[in-house]
Amino acid sequence: MKILIVNTYDTLGGAARAAYRLHKALQSIGITSQMLVQTKVSDDPTILGPEKKLEKFINLKRPELDAFPLRFYKYKKESLFSPSWLPFTNIINKINASDADIVHLHWIANGMINIKDISRIKKPIVWSLHDMWAFSGGCHYDTCCGKYATHCNMCPLLGATNKNDLSYHVFEKKMKYLTKIQSLTIVGLSRWISECAGKSPLLAGREIVNLPNPLDSQVFRPIKKDLARDLLNLPFNKNLVLFGADNAILDSRKGFSKLTAALHSLKSTDIELVVFGSGPLLNSLNFDYPVHHFGYMPGDLSLRILYNAADVMVMPSIQENLANTIMESLACGTPVVAFDIGGNRDMIDHQKNGYLAEPFSPTSLAKGIDWVLNYTLPQELSHNARQKVIERFDSRKVAEQYLGLYQKIVEKVLLD
């Protein structure tokens, strides 16, 4: 069995990390897996990226070029929107020239593959939904507008007032070309996104399978909290609340305003906030608590130490699929508080390994944080958190599930 995993990046971003983890998990059970990416930053020889300097340079410019039509929408929000219109690419030729049995698409935005070219792939396709883009008019998260279920137009993320807007044309283009794909199986990483995909006419009649991302539970595992705090120079005598997200202040979907309101109403004392992820520093904001800002965390080891240093992690996102950060935190034995939305409930068992707050109440979020920090048996929460990941999301178990899916698809193609 030979698998070609296709993603815009190899290790940059949540979808890339998830795709790469699947790539390595498949290899660990004897499957020949390669990754094909638009931008490669790692030195993994099983990842195929651009080789010529000109191609590398063009690929670096592709995200900016692909976003050009968005300049005509002056009221556009900060949330990501991908037209995927760039016509010049040789990615499809590379895909079709490979000896892969299955092409497994992941996150292919930022100019990697245009919509028409997806239909030119001559091999069976599996497409993992890291967000809503595959079945929307261009948004990656619709902020609950729901138009993907009928036909996108007057997109609220674009600030559009015309029905014949960019989202309408992207939706029409997908309707034209996605329906031409002969063998397409959709993988919804969470139950929520699987249900959403089933509502969209763009994926009508397609098989939709719910399979999660894998996580190596030996990489993300508990270590002594005091050691983690010592390594990061964090206080030993404080309750540390962890929050991680890219561009959290500008992207309203990340729920930073909800977190801010929740922190202001906490009953617990001796709180300090620990933040990681790219974006503006939070230290200058008016918090009632000290803030430790670590910025972008490049590797799994540094993330593991950070999760272990915290008493609780908070994910206040308004929409979320299957967040890597929640799964990673649980694997390290750190309970998570999040709104009861999206894929959060696939990982968080309410008041067993974390807390599912009422959407989108800062008061309920604060209640959850207080509940975790004051729980009388913290080791029980930590044990439950890790067991959830071992039982449902461990790399080997998930890789075996994907192998079963691939085998089923290949057999069906042979019979047809």
Image (cartoon, rainbow, N blue to C red):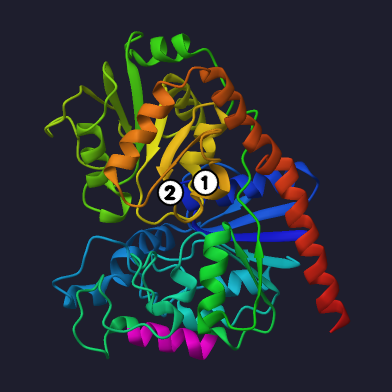
- Tell me if 190 is positioned left or right of 28 in this view: left
Q: What is the magenta range? A: 168-177
Q: Are marks 2 and 1 in contact (CB under 8 Å)?
A: yes
Characterize the magenta stretch by its predominant secondary structure: helix
Q: Amino acid at mark 2?
A: Gly
Residue 290 drawn above or below residue 101: above
Q: Is residue 173 magenta?
A: yes
Q: Residue at x 21, y 88 (%)?
A: 162
Q: Position of residue 29 (x, y in %)?
A: 79, 44
- For label 2, the SS is loop
- Residue situated in front as seen by the camera: 98 or 5: 5
Residue linked to disc 2:
13
- Residue situated in front as seen by the camera: 321 or 11: 321
Q: Amino acid at mark 1?
A: Arg
> Distance from label 2 to label 1 (Cα)?
6 Å
- For label 1, the SS is helix
Residue linked to disc 1:
17
Disc 1 crowd, CA 10 A, few/some/many (<14, 14-19, 20+): some
- Name the image quarter holding the N terminus: bottom right
Q: Position of residue 225 (x, y in %)?
A: 47, 14
Q: Residue at x 65, y 28 (%)?
A: 218
- Tell me if 329 is positioned left or right of 208 in this view: left
